[in-house]
């Protein structure tokens, strides 16, 4: 039986990085966020592709992710750890040249006590109230930290995809106030801020979702195709129902395909009776409830029986699926399960 397959276009990721790099301009370095295993697409393959395009700096969430990435890309490129210096991280940080982004006075104290010779960055809270040194802590610690020359000082925009919120401008002003005159390399923006305006670029930008074909980078090339095999078909007569709970009833004699994938593979149950899969350029309604391992699809209007149907493709990307279930493309991507066979295409290597 054919396996469910997640096709990953590394050329598209490379193209998206180059397009974002062009937007950031020659005075700003373009890094790459490859946390959560490059949003589920394989950080080892993605990072090596981006290295060949000129990326030299990467961001991950955890020291464990950084350790795996260092093994994949070797010595040299910068790897920043966004969660900072957590208890138990010292050996990984010291031995593998990983740079923690210190987020609190407690982390600063830990780092200076156990890894005083290991480079570090600093995150500042400019209004998101999630991670980062608040103004009072920054003012108290800045003299000592600046003396040790952090490799980066950064913050994070909370509303970079909301053009008229006003929060971006407030955070920009706060970040500028807190960091002007430090002489440090500065970073404020991920994908949204990079697109929002050049005044948000500073010395380094950190695109993530835009690399993988997601909003708010509307010009991004699609990166993923999710192809799901048909394992059985049947004719369903008028008045018969399909799936758990009898939530779909045939209004005509219907040709129904059962597909090998379900919510155990990251396909949300909220797509039940609320989505379509694609046979080439033809949409086919998802009918009945998404179950753990199976989906049912109405293929009555197709000529013949397809071997597989696509949930994600050029017609229906991660953000389109996200809109159907009231979430964001990030969640759709990172939910795609380990049971998929990941196949990579790349011609630019």
Image (tube, helix red, strand yellow):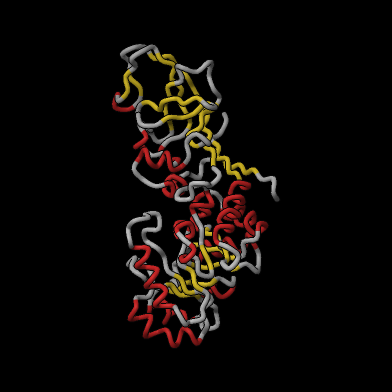
In the image, is residue 107 above or below residue 323?
Answer: below
In the image, is residue 180 above or below residue 79?
Answer: below
Q: Tell which of 169 and 62 is nearer to you.
A: 169
Locate the N terminus and report the quarter of the image it occupies: top right
Left or right: residue 335 versus residue 344 is left
Q: Tell which of 190 and 49 is nearer to you.
A: 190
Residue depicted at 54% across the width and 22% down the height: 306
In the image, is residue 148 above or below residue 81?
Answer: below
Q: Position of residue 170 (x, y in %)?
A: 34, 67
Q: Tell which of 208 and 101 is nearer to you.
A: 208
Q: Position of residue 182 (x, y in %)?
A: 48, 82
In the image, is residue 75 above or below residue 12?
Answer: below
Q: Position of residue 215 (x, y in %)?
A: 45, 48
Residue depicted at 58% across the width and 66% down the height: 29
Residue depicted at 40% across the width and 72% down the height: 175
Judge whether residue 87 can be spotted in this image.
Answer: no
Residue depicted at 54% across the width and 64% down the height: 66
Judge whether residue 207 can be spotted in this image.
Answer: yes
Q: Position of residue 114 (x, y in %)?
A: 48, 81
Left or right: residue 243 versus residue 112 is left
Q: How many marks?
A: 0
């Amino acid at each position: 039986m054919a396996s469910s397959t997640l096709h990953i276009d590394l050329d598209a990721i490379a193209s998206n990085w180059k397009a974002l790099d062009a937007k950031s301009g020659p005075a700003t370095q373009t890094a790459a966020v490859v946390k959560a295993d490059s949003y589920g697409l394989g950080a080892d393959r993605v990072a090596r592709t981006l290295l060949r395009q000129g990326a030299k700096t990467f961001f991950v969430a955890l020291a464990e992710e950084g350790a795996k990435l260092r093994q994949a890309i070797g010595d040299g490129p910068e790897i920043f750890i966004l969660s900072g210096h957590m208890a138990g991280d010292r050996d990984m940080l010291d031995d593998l040249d990983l740079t923690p982004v210190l987020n609190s006075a407690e982390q600063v104290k830990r780092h200076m006590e156990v890894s005083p010779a290991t480079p570090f960055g600093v995150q500042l809270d400019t209004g998101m109230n999630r991670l980062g040194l608040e103004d009072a802590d920054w003012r108290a610690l800045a003299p000592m930290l600046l003396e040790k020359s952090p490799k980066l000082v950064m913050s994070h925009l909370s509303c970079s995809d909301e053009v008229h919120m006003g929060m971006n401008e407030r955070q920009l002003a706060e970040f500028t106030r807190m960091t002007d005159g430090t002489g440090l390399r500065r970073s404020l923006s991920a994908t949204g801020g990079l697109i929002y305006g050049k005044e948000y670029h500073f010395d380094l930008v950190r695109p993530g979702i835009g690399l993988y074909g997601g909003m708010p980078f509307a010009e991004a090339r699609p990166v993923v195709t999710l192809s799901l095999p048909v394992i059985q078909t049947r004719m369903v007569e008028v008045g018969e129902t399909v799936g758990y709970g009898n939530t779909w009833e045939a209004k005509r004699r219907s040709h129904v395909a059962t597909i090998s994938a379900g919510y155990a593979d990251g396909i949300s149950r909220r797509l039940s009776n609320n989505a379509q899969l694609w046979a080439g350029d033809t949409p086919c309604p998802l009918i009945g409830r998404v179950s753990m391992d199976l989906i049912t699809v109405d293929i009555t209007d197709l000529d013949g029986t397809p071997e597989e149907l696509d949930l994600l493709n050029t017609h229906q990307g991660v953000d389109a699926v996200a809109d159907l279930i009231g979430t964001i493309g990030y969640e759709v991507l990172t939910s795609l399960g380990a049971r998929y066979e990941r196949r990579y295409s790349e011609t630019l290597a």
